[in-house]
Amino acid sequence: MSSPVGADPAVVGPYLASVLGDDRWREVTVELIAAGMSNLTYVVTPAGGTPEESVILRRPPTGAVLATAHDMAREHRVISALGGTPVPVPRTLHMCTDTAVLGAPFYVMERVFGLHVVDRIPAGYADEPAQRRAIGEGLIDVLADLHAVDPGAVGLGDFGRPEGFMARQVRRWTQQWEATRDRDRPGLDALAARLAETVPASQRTGIVHGDFRLDNCLLDPDRPGGVRAVLDWEMSTLGDPLADLGMLHVYWPEAGEPSVAGQSTVTALEGFPSRAEVAARYAERSGLDLADLHWYVGFAYFKFAAIVAGIVARSAAGAMAGKDTAGYADRIDPCVERGRAALDDGVL
């Protein structure tokens, strides 16, 4: 069997045996389970071991990357800090900052077994509407639990710059759009300007996941509504918690709606809470005032449009070899219209 790129078993095994103080790790198998533009995720299993004995190794993509774009120490830090809170995260085992080992920093964490739902729910799991409602409510409750964590109490008081967070986010993604324009899009320019003029005051500083959605969680396979682990913390920081709720709205299509941004339509199945019900439950759990939620939803659609525009531009420049980006440009204008409708008409 060929070794996966980025995590040579002949290097990983002896290294883990040393740092974990357990010789059974000296020989391992390594399987790449998640690749792409994001961080790489591998399952590492000791020779002769069972899946339950495996651990997970995470590292940046191979090749040149921006130092801040795939910060392993940062991801390891936030997961470790949340270990003693109600937020379900894997237990971290080791952080390696020595790039001589694998060519990049990496960390190792326990392997959590759960159901990963992307674009469909497997038959036999949550077949009943009440079970699907439980899944939706479970996700909302975990998000509220995350935002209730006191960053200072878990050692994350310096994990970000919460002052002016949303204004900086608007500037950042406006600059991203301006740097990667695929063509003239006055609607996107107008949305950026409106957002910059109307940034609401933050009510609370919290730990922001940055990309919280159904397929970044592992569900309890035995109990619909339970969340075994929240994954993919690479965009986490300190900031305005409602940024997470706004983005969750983008990833929460309802029945009869088109998937304007190419999102999974699982939440459109009968039983899942509507976006209004998502907001109501989050408000009840968090105690936050959602009078300005339409702004955060408008920003989320703007951010999504800017991200897609960047992908389109990189694809046109030949920098997305092997990635199917057909139809991506067609997603931008519908996202802009949804963002405008949220901002101007209060449509959530």
Image (tube, rainbow, N blue to C red):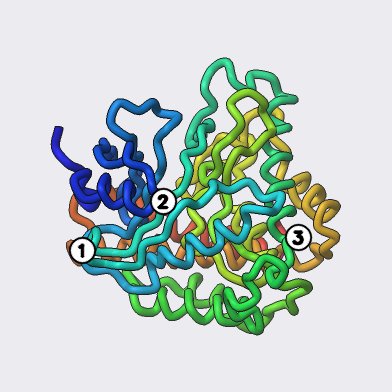
Vertical placement of residue 204 versus 53, above or below = below
Q: Residue at x 27, y 45 (%)?
A: 13
Residue labelled with disc 3: 148
Q: Which residue is drawn at 35% across and 78% down?
A: 179
Mark 3 and mark 2 residues within 8 Å of each other at the beta carbon: no
Residue labelled with disc 1: 63
> Identity of the amino acid at label 2?
Val
Vertical placement of residue 84 versus 123, above or below = below
Choose top left, top right, bottom left or bottom right for residue 195.
Answer: bottom right
* Mark 2, other Cα within 10 Å: few <14 / some 14–19 / many ≥20: many
Secondary structure of residue under mark 3: helix
* Mark closer to the chain start, 2 or 1: 1
* Mark closer to the chain start, 3 or 2: 2
Residue labelled with disc 2: 108
> Identity of the amino acid at label 3?
Ala
Query: Is residue 66 found left or right of 197 in the rendered image?
Result: left
Residue 346 x %, y %: 73, 62
Q: Which residue is drawn at 85% across and 52% down?
A: 284
> Identity of the amino acid at label 1?
Gly
